[in-house]
Amino acid sequence: MSKKGSREERELVHMLWSANCAAMRAPASGGATKKPLPDIIAGNGEIYLAIEVKSTSKDRIYINSDKIEALCEFADIFGAKPYVGIKFIRKKWRFLDPNILMKTRQNNYKLDEDLAFEKGLDFEELLKKSKQVKF
Amino acid sequence: MSKKGSREERELVHMLWSANCAAMRAPASGGATKKPLPDIIAGNGEIYLAIEVKSTSKDRIYINSDKIEALCEFADIFGAKPYVGIKFIRKKWRFLDPNILMKTRQNNYKLDEDLAFEKGLDFEELLKKSKQVKF
């Protein structure tokens, strides 16, 4: 079963392991449970991350609010910091605290390149800054 | 893609969520990485668990040492407590610290009902006792 965004998820999992962070992707099926799951869980003994992965060839992306709610719910129960990991084509990864995202009038979320690069973290910052936060 | 032990993994994931512990199964494919992955990761903000799930209709089971090594390696990097979760048919779940397992002369591990019920934890103890341990 193929899954949208799998290539980017695999790339990010690989980056995390290379940075000594153990990472696991969610099963494609959602693990046959109806529970909220992020795309990736990662940890290194100091920080725990729940990441929703998005990628686009455009300069903006819309994210359904239920995805963001599920991400935050999982992270809250598990004890992880929630992030949206976004890969704009030919740009570096950026990671955003879901609280930073802009809500649309349809109650979904909009994430554009300007916001991602002004307010988001790069990969190194993701691993460093998450440490300083006590959840 | 079906996976041996899937039914028991789903059952355990369900039990964990019911106990307010967020849980995720590993992807059946291993997530297309060559990295060591447990069958289940779980967390509740206080404890983090990496679980290798086994089930058998016999009164003993043998576990390859590479499975146990992978479990411990993942748990060590991620920052979780490693457990073998064993379901003997018609018995309750038992959870064992991998260090308790007996090594066979072939350098694999043997886990029988006696050991599981003498030295292992039941589900409630798993969630309670893991809290007291500082990893």
Image (cartoon, coloured by chain):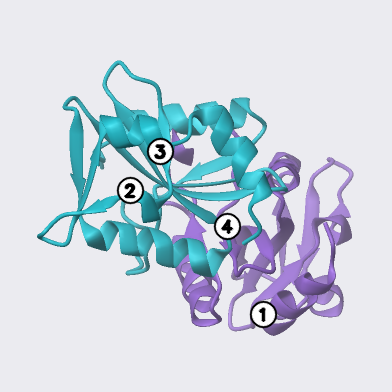
Chain colours: A cyan, B purple
Q: How many C-alpha atoms fall within 10 Å of the one at disc 1: few (<14), some, or many (≥20)?
A: some
Q: Earlier in the sequence, mark 4 or mark 1?
A: 4
Give the number of the disc on residue A119: 3
**Residue corresponding to mark 4:** B41
**Residue under the image location 60 percent in, 31 percent down:** A17
Residue B91 in which image quadrant: bottom right
Q: Is residue B43 above or below residue A46?
A: below
Residue B39 in the image: x percent, y percent?
56, 54
Q: Earlier in the sequence, mark 3 or mark 2?
A: 2
Q: Is residue B65 above or below residue A14?
A: below
Q: Is residue B112 visible?
A: yes
Residue B108 in the image: x percent, y percent?
79, 45
**Residue under the image location 84 percent in, 67 percent down:** B133
Q: Give how far apart the Cα atoms at labels 3 and 2 are.
A: 30 Å
Residues under numbered marks 1 and 2 in contact, where contact means CB atoms less than 8 Å apart: no
Same chain letter for marks 2 and 4: no
| Residue lying farthest to the top in this orientation | A90
Give the number of the disc on residue A28: 2
Q: Give how far apart the Cα atoms at labels 2 and 4 are.
A: 16 Å
Residue A28 in the image: x percent, y percent?
33, 48
Q: Quadrant of the C terminus of chain A?
A: bottom right
